[in-house]
Amino acid sequence: MAARPLSEVVRGVDERLGPAGFLKKALKKVFPDHWTFLLGEVAMYSFVIIVLTGIFLTLFFNPSMKDVVYRGSYVPLRGVRMSQAYESTLRISFDVRGGLLVRQLHHWATIVFLGAIIAHMLRNFFTGAFRKPRELNWVIGVILFLLVMLNGLFGYSLPDDLLSGTGIRILEGVLLSIPIVGSYLTMFLFGGAFPGELIIPRLFTIHILLIPLILLALIPLHAVVLTWRQTHTQFPGRGRTDRVVEGKPFWPSFIIKTLAFQMWVFFVISLLAVTFQVNPIWLFGPYNPGHISAGSQPDWYMGWLEGSLRLMPGWEINAFGHTIPLNVLIPALLVPGMLFTVLAVYPFLERWAIGDYRVHNLLDRPRDVPARTGIGMAGVTFYGLLWMAGANDIIAKTFHIPLYGTTWFFRFAVIIGPILAFAISRRVALGLQRREMEMLRHGIESGEIIRRPSGEYEETEHPLDADEEAVIRGRRLPHRLPELEPDRAGVEPKEARSPTARLRRRLNRLYTEDVLPLPDGDHEERPAIESERPSP
Ligand code: HEM
């Protein structure tokens, strides 16, 4: 009996808004499956925890820098003068029921969120998921990465404890280093001389309102709308092409799996939050611009910028009554500026170098494009070394090495490390390709040695099974630019002579020269989705 009114309501809604057709199609939509596709989902579900716990914290946090004397239940700080922001964080930690747990959850979810974002970004980079038609989604991803990192920094600055105040002091120094407008910007942000009384309320508004609103608009666009509209990529395999998707339907397989996965993400973050203490601000004490504690470390995702600052020699330019502090400008603004710009434009740069305007729904394996893999590994090494340099004092103390020894080591390592990483990973990718070409030619060595009637010993080999072979054969070769022959007088055509044309050819060679052809020739078994005509 109850079913009839319900079906009436459903029919009524459908007659007015017509969602049935869309839903029927949507529920059957096929989703490819691979464990690496879950990394984006870890990020998404961590964000859900951040929003929920953030709403709770907002109810109790007081973003004010006015002085109060602490009278709460944490005895060692009773009678100490501090800002209301610090006092309210102590209150959340010790006097609000469940407050410390929610702080722990909020902080751990942020740590996992940024870890998942970076892992997800690397998966998209090394598999070429950013290629046409997903360039826009890549660029949105880079913006998300930057915003989430900044919001993490602003968030852990809010309690106004000694550690976070040191972070804000660095922020002030970075702003001051900007030529001409630096001092104006600093006065504008702090509302006067450092620290003033405005920075915490301002960071609070940015942290809980401005950036979250942008994230709430961009994350669904990035993770749901565009991923749905453009379909998800898949790894090469039997029966998979740029047009044919193999996977499980959205309902029930994908939905049930993703909900279960959401529970797992919640579980792991809760386990971390109840097990490992993070940011115990009561041990650091309230912020005082005249104090600093040894061994100060930012949250892990800011470590690379800390390292970048620590490595830079103390260079400054003094001219016309102005000082340009290169020792801050380069490591704190130029290095991250370049890294994020290169990240954002990489899809377009690679497309330009390869001249590949085809739609790619099949992913590359990292070995299939050794140059890209090499560039990615160089970037990872550069980031990783800067990150380690951010803990150079801890490394020096733990291993009893002179502090300046670690600084000099990292100064050289950030230059040599990425070059080595590029060369080694490119060779490894090439080696893996060679092995696969051998496997296609001769099959897999069985370990069984037989003796022929002629007396000769030989190892038997099994041919690859159809699935393994399809994976190797499923690749698409990077596009080689056509050779431009010199004319009869030996003069290169005009379009090959400009510096940009030369650079493009050089890059094209880099991407194409170390890709081995299949033993029986590469053939395009998939029909091209559209013409090779360049489109934006
Ligand atoms: C707030 C941070 C982010 C969230 C919540 C997020 C979430 C997601 C989700 C759920 C998907 C679909 C499933 C998957 O492939 O994992 C996705 C796809 C994608 N994301 Fe992200 N992402 C974030 C940041 C990034 C970043 C930093 C990049 C790169 C710079 C990026 C690039 C991409 C690309 C290219 C796709 C399409 C992948 C494909 O179809 O294979 N995302 N993202």
Image: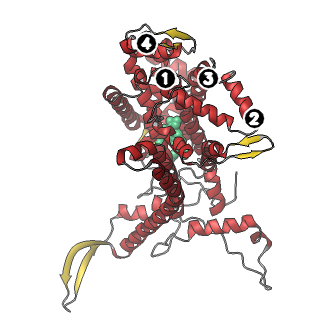
Whether residues under marks 1 and 4 lie with C-beta atoms below 8 angstroms apart, the answer is: no
Image quadrant of residue 42?
A: top left
Q: How did the renderer colour the structure?
A: secondary structure
Q: Secondary structure at mark 4?
A: helix
Query: Residue 26 at x, y = what percent?
Result: 49, 35
Query: Residue 291 at x, y = what percent?
Result: 51, 26
Which mark is on residue 181?
2
* Earlier-in-chain disc, 1 versus 4: 4
User: Label 1 belongs to which residue?
Assistant: 161
**What distance separates the C-alpha of mark 1 from that of mark 2?**
29 Å
**What distance separates the C-alpha of mark 4 from that of mark 2?**
39 Å
**What distance separates the C-alpha of mark 1 from that of mark 3?**
13 Å
**What distance separates the C-alpha of mark 1 from that of mark 4?**
14 Å
Q: Quadrant of the N terminus?
A: top left
Which mark is on residue 91?
4
* Earlier-in-chain disc, 1 versus 3: 1
Three-letter code, disc 2: Val
Query: Residue 497 at x, y = what percent?
Result: 77, 71
Query: Residue 200 at x, y = what percent?
Result: 58, 20
Three-letter code, disc 4: Arg
* Earlier-in-chain disc, 2 versus 3: 2
* Earlier-in-chain disc, 3 versus 4: 4
- Left or right: 165, with 461 as reference point: right
Against 303, residue 430 (above or below) is below
Q: Residues within 10 Å of mark 1 (few under 14, many from 20)?
A: many
Asked whether residue 242 appears in the rendered view, the answer is: no
Query: Residue at left 46%, top 31%?
Result: 293
User: Label 3 belongs to which residue?
Assistant: 195
Three-letter code, disc 1: Asp
Q: Nearer the viewer, residue 170 or 461?
A: 170
